[in-house]
Amino acid sequence: MIGLFDSGVGGLTVLKKFIHRAPGASFVYLGDTARTPYGNKGANTIEKYAIENTRFLLERGATSIVIACNSVSAVALDALRKTYPEIPFFDVITPATELVAADTSIKKIGIIGTRATVGSGVYQDLIHQTRPDAQVVAAACPLLVPLAEEGWQGRPETQRIVRRYLKPMRDAQIDALILGCTHYPLLLKEIRSGVHKRVKIIDSPRAVYEKIAASHPELFSQKENPSQQFFFTDCSEHTARIAQTWIGRGIRCELAELEF
């Protein structure tokens, strides 16, 4: 069974893609809404949270883990693999960079993400390993996760903030923009209008699904009565409403009590 975790509701963008492509697959999701956002925290704290989240999912039957959080993927992947060497981990960064690197028509690449993700330099490093000629422009966008968590899509304030963050991308005349946070597809309309129409938007959910389905198709085996569980560390009505709206159907949000 697949286990997925994120700092909040952003990881549901990955899970939504999984459900759409494999509705009969079993999974357990954990959103750490009590401690969101992760992107403004230090590496040691993010590693600690990631290990605790993984332990929770494994205790509930997960046999593989999708790190549906770019901040964790950027700074805690090695720590997770060292702590749980027998568990397959899938990050959300590598598939997106592979997708961009394979498209030789893309010369200038923009990346937006949290401070932790952008500061790690992991996107830039992975892209330049195969595309040393690529020009990469990265920008930290710390306000976008709270805006997504609060459900502020469509508000003029959100549009102004997004446009300000994307100004370096417009100035650089990028060819593609990587959404380096799983929360950002929740603000796709605002982001799309903040860059030129010709810019290709690369989001993690599709790239992650395709990579896992190709290498581990058994994880998406269809069952007549699949086990599909949603846990949150702060299971408020607000969280439940956003989760159900994004997934597109009624879900049962359960409270996760982690050992902090």
Image (spheres, rainbow, N blue to C red):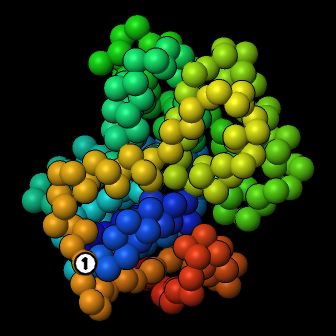
Residue type marked 1 = Gln
In the picture, which quadrant includes the C terminus?
bottom left
Q: Nearer the viewer, residue 142 or 44?
A: 142
Looking at the image, which residue is at 17% across and 51% down?
215
Quadrant assignment, res 102: top left
- Mark 1 is surrounded, within 10 Å at the Cα level, by few (under 14), some (14 to 19) or many (20 or more) other residues, namely few
| x and y percentages locating residue 99 in the rendered image | 38, 34
Q: Nearer the viewer, residue 40 or 71?
A: 71
Q: Residue furthest top?
A: 133
Q: Residue furthest left?
A: 86
Is 30 placed above or below 103 here?
below
| x and y percentages locating residue 69 in the rendered image | 45, 53
Residue labelled with disc 1: 222
Looking at the image, which residue is at 76% across and 39% down?
193
Is 257 placed above or below 125 here?
below
Looking at the image, which residue is at 25% across and 43% down?
78
Q: Nearer the viewer, residue 175 or 169?
A: 175
Q: Secondary structure at mark 1?
A: loop
Q: Is residue 119 left or right of residue 126?
A: right
| x and y percentages locating residue 171 in the rendered image | 73, 16
